[in-house]
Amino acid sequence: MSLFIIGISISMILFLLASGLTLIFGVLRMVNFSHGAIYMIGAYVGYQIFQWSGNFWLALALTPICVGILGAIIEFFLMRPIYKYNTHSFELMIQIGVIYVLIDLVRILWGDDYLLFLKPVQLRETIEVLGVNLDPYRLFIICLSLLLALVLFWGLEKTSLGIAVRATSSNPSMAECLGINVAVLRTSVFGFGSALAAIGGVVAAAIYPIDSHMGDHILVDCFIVVILGGLGNIHGAIVGSLIIGMTRAYGQYYFSDSVNILTFGIFIVTLLFLPEGIFNRRGRKA
Amino acid sequence: MKRKNNLIFIAFLVCILGICFPGMATSEEATFKIGNVVPFTGYFGTYGKDFKHALELAVEHRGGKLLGKPIELIFEDSASNPKVAVQKTMKVIAAGSQFVVGAFSSSSTLAMMPILKRRKIPHLSMLSTHDDITGKHKTRYTFRTSTSQGVENKIVIEYLKSSDAKNMYIVNADYKLFHDIVSDVKNGLKGSGITIVDTSSAALGTKDFSVIIEKISQSNADTIFAELLGNDLIAFMKQAGQKGLFKNRKVVTTLLTKDLCEATLPYSVNVAMTARYNYALKTPLNEKLIKSHWKLYNEEPQAPDFYDGLTWFMNVIEATGSWDKEKWIEAFEDSSHYGVKGKMVMNASNHQATQDGFFGTYTMQTKGSKDPWGYPTTSCYWGLSKVYKGKALYQ
């Protein structure tokens, strides 16, 4: 059972990142390669707020706001001016630039030394559930991610903002004609996607080491999740996260030397039969 | 026509001069340049500044001069990448380096060696551990002044044999070097009474060790041999410690440096580790290094191997009194050094310096504690428990 919980918690951290990435793609039609760097920034900002306040929960609450604003600033000043060129190569170059700038900024502000960020006191001791010792922090990650997923689904389905987001992702020109401020919406979605990545960074920082390249490794899995689930599809993101997270967990347990082969193998085979992803583009988009 | 003939004649004369006086290319320079290809960025980037400090101190301690010329240290970032290390090696050679130091990772060092061999430039490797550096791929121009991986493995094997370990679980990075280490240790423990319960590999950059930790907790292992690097080791130690994995189990590793120990407190207390350097060792050069390093950088030396290796080679060069690199090589092959780690003797057959090996345990220090030199300790202190003599190790 604990292996199952571990797998779900890995999946949920992936979902936190993948949901932001797929949301950004859905609305902005842009693959945000700097998403891993934003996740990393979330970890560092969370660490710093924790250092100042000593309160993990405050760090968890404030970090997405700070990083969300940063994301919005990046979109407004760096991405918006190049939309008119309608070329992905410009977007890619800017995003790579953003990655390097953020990494160096982190090194200047926090240095290269390893940082220590502990779990909240309330979630440190293992608990026994049905005779199995479980890590309560991982249960917390699962609950938090599920809650955010529900909020995301509800927001996209039931609110006028969600309708505007779906309309813009479907047909931005028509959405604009209907009075939706597409430019503001794009900035907001980028900021919100960044906030989701930052939440992932904060929750991960308590169990994973914090370093300036922590976003690199998880971003690869994140892309696999998003492509597997279908670009721009939130439902796909959650299913993709579960597939990859559980593969990683069970693969590590039974085939530790071959876990990457297993993960990428599943990815390749799925794309051979479903090149648009599991939830293809005709399905609901973000 | 006459002008053309004159030009041809002048070109011919220049060629003859170049052939007759090849020594001109190796004649004295205005400065003595030393090329240093070390990582300042990338996976091992955190160590670059420590290497730089150590090398600069070594130069400062000899008055900044070698063979009567001011020493110029040229630093290039290998970016923890063998391809970049190769490019930067060519760059420092082009800049006129008399010899080259570097890199850090064995893959980068092995990549640099053929170029330095082709260009006949002496090369010092001071931290890369792969056995091939002074084994299968050894060259006339490369010398290693630090321990090799094979010797570190021997130390671990001897320690485990003498410990009360009965069942051991091995966790290693999924990287050839670490697979070789594990294979070496497994072979060394055959017939020792220690059972290898299981082995798990984790890809470099693995952040989540919870599955492996779960496997260990379900096993009957009383000892964990953790051969993981940098952040991976931090992740493992933190997650395993939080799970309570170390309560009744001993951890043995070769890779938990002091900064990693501090990043994983309190879980890194009592971790047993090999070391190439015994900070508390009372030698004149060690005392000099420690006092200077504390004065300049307010911390204990982080890269004593670099300081020691460079000091040794510069002493050898000075003793030759010559700019002839071949003479340096011959002299180095036949040299010994009493440095920060005690006595080291260069083995002429493979250019590997024999030296003592150390084994010890990390303890947690309270605020205000002092080390053997009277300086404040950090929260993690590695204390020596055994010395393994060089002669036996390098047989």
Image (cartoon, rainbow, N blue to C red):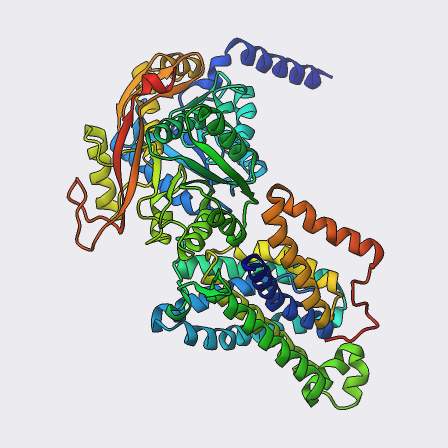
Q: Is residue A181 visible?
A: no
Q: Is residue A113 left or right of residue B389?
A: right
A281 and A187: which is toward the camera = A281
Q: Position of residue A180 (x, y in %)?
A: 73, 88
Q: Please give the name of the residue rendered at 32% of the width and 15% of the height, measured from the top-left corner.
A: B335
Q: Please give the name of the residue rendered at 27% of the width and 34% of the height, measured from the top-left corner.
A: B278
Q: Please give the name of the residue rendered at 64% of the width and 47% of the height, measured from the top-left corner.
A: A259
From this view, report whether residue A128 is shown above or below residue A113: below
From this view, report whether residue B336 is shown above or below residue A122: above
B314 and A265: which is toward the camera = A265
Furthest residue in direction front, as rendered: A131
Q: Is residue A6 visible?
A: yes
Q: Is residue A156 left or right of residue B361?
A: right
Q: Position of residue A193 (x, y in %)?
A: 61, 73
Total marks in image: 0
Q: Please give the name of the residue rendered at 56% of the width and 57% of the height, measured from the top-left corner.
A: A3
Q: Is residue A175 left or right of residue A8?
A: right
A172 and A54: which is toward the camera = A54
Q: Quadrant of residue B323?
A: top left
Q: Position of residue A191 (x, y in %)?
A: 59, 75
Q: Position of residue A286 (x, y in %)?
A: 72, 76
Q: Quadrant of the N terminus of chain B?
A: top right
Furthest residue in direction left, as rendered: B374
Q: Quadrant of residue B73?
A: top left
Q: Quadrant of the C terminus of chain B?
A: top left
Q: Quadrant of residue B287?
A: top left
